[in-house]
Amino acid sequence: MTRKGFTLIELMVVILIVGILAAASIPLMRGRVDSAKWSEANATAGTIRSAVRVYFAETGSSAAIIGALDDADIQSALGFNDADLTGTYFVPGDYEITAVDATGKATIVVTGSTADAPTGSMTLNPDGSWVKN
């Protein structure tokens, strides 16, 4: 009589291989989660940057819009309200316009403050590059 099936050793080897693959992939996935969270900030910072360029084109000045976006006067000048800038991981106070160059391109620093936000801060530079601080 012939037996069909897997032996205990074969099953344990398969479980060991799956465990090793899972242990190797978890750190990779964790990095992807932070990257996805920062993409929310990047999208919102790009919208803020566009609003700054429009404001600069209309007024020729940027003095009134330098600062954190939780300031009601800055939000009003750029045409935003709190709901426009509130996302899953970032809130209006996480975005700060630190400078506007002579062509109206803003430098925006984003620092997460909510419990689920990724750690650290990133800067959207006038040339469009997104740099971790």
Image (spheres, rainbow, N blue to C red):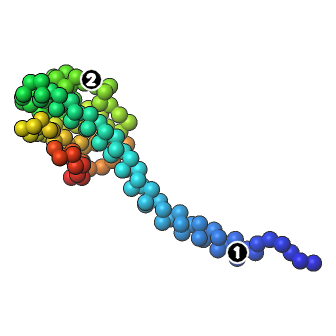
User: Is residue 30 visible to the viewer in this orientation of the structure?
Assistant: yes
Q: As drawn, is 10 to the left or to the right of 54?
A: right
- The three-letter amino acid code for the residue at tag 1 is Glu
SS category of the residue bearing label 2: loop
Q: Is residue 79 above or below residue 10?
A: above
Check the image and name the residue furthest to the right: 1
Closer to us: 8 or 86: 86
Question: Residue visible at 21% across and 45% down?
Answer: 128
Closer to us: 94 or 132: 132
Q: Is residue 82 above or below residue 10?
A: above
Q: What residue does disc 2 label? A: 81
Q: As drawn, is 55 to the left or to the right of 13?
A: left
Q: Is residue 114 above or below residue 51?
A: below
Where residue 19 appears, x then y in whole percent? 57, 66
Quarter the N terminus occupies: bottom right
Where residue 78 appears, x then y in whole percent? 19, 25
Where residue 117 appears, x then y in whole percent? 34, 43
- The three-letter amino acid code for the residue at tag 2 is Asn
User: Is residue 93 visible to the viewer in this orientation of the structure?
Assistant: no
Is label 1 or label 2 in front?
2
Where residue 10 appears, x then y in whole percent? 70, 75
Q: Any mark on residue 10, and which?
A: 1
